[in-house]
Image (cartoon, grey):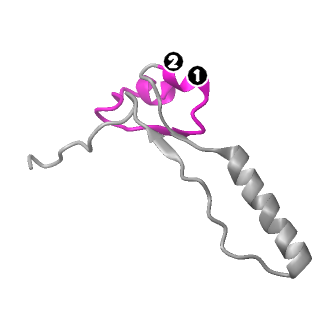
Amino acid sequence: MAVAQEAGLRLPEDLSVVGFDDVPLASWTSPPLTTCRANPASWGRAAAQALVEIIEQGTTADVELAPATLVIRGSTGPAPVRGGR
């Protein structure tokens, strides 16, 4: 975000930025970073369970992961209107 701002871009008016994993620092950046909050512990459990099934049975069912959540903060906005529309 700093590089974009140094290049003269305004966040989020000219450019939207989204991060992943919702680290604590995300809410302290300027502007605060929109981020995707995941549940890595549940994803790890699902992966381990699938691996055990593959080892024991030679296959596994489709793995369903806990959904991620989009945490909208100040680094994203609507797409800019181009061409006077």
Q: Is residue 2 shown left or right of residue 83? A: right
Residue 23 in magenta?
yes
Say which element carries label 1: helix
Q: CA distance from mark 2 to mark 1?
A: 5 Å
State which region is magenta.
1-29
Please name the residue shown 49% across and 44% down the image.
69
Q: Looking at the picture, how far across and down is residue 49, in whole percent?
A: 80, 63
Disc 2 crowd, CA 10 A, few/some/many (<14, 14-19, 20+): few
Please name the residue shown 80% across and 80% down the image.
59
Please name the residue shown 70% across and 76% down the image.
61
Q: Looking at the picture, how far across and down is residue 21, in whole percent?
A: 60, 38
Kind of residue sitting beneath label 2: Trp
Residue extending farthest to the bottom is 58
Please name the residue shown 72% across and 45% down the image.
41
Disc 1 crowd, CA 10 A, few/some/many (<14, 14-19, 20+): few
Q: Looking at the picture, how far across and down is residue 72, in whole percent?
A: 40, 35
Residue 11 occupies quadrant:
top left
Q: Which mark is residue 28?
A: 2
Say which element carries label 2: helix
Please name the residue that numbered disc 1 is placed on. 25
Residue extending farthest to the right is 56
The vertical placement of 20 against 75, above or below, is below
Kind of residue sitting beneath label 1: Leu
Q: Is residue 10 shown left or right of residue 60? A: left
Residue 8 occupies quadrant:
top left
Q: Is residue 13 shown left or right of residue 82? A: right
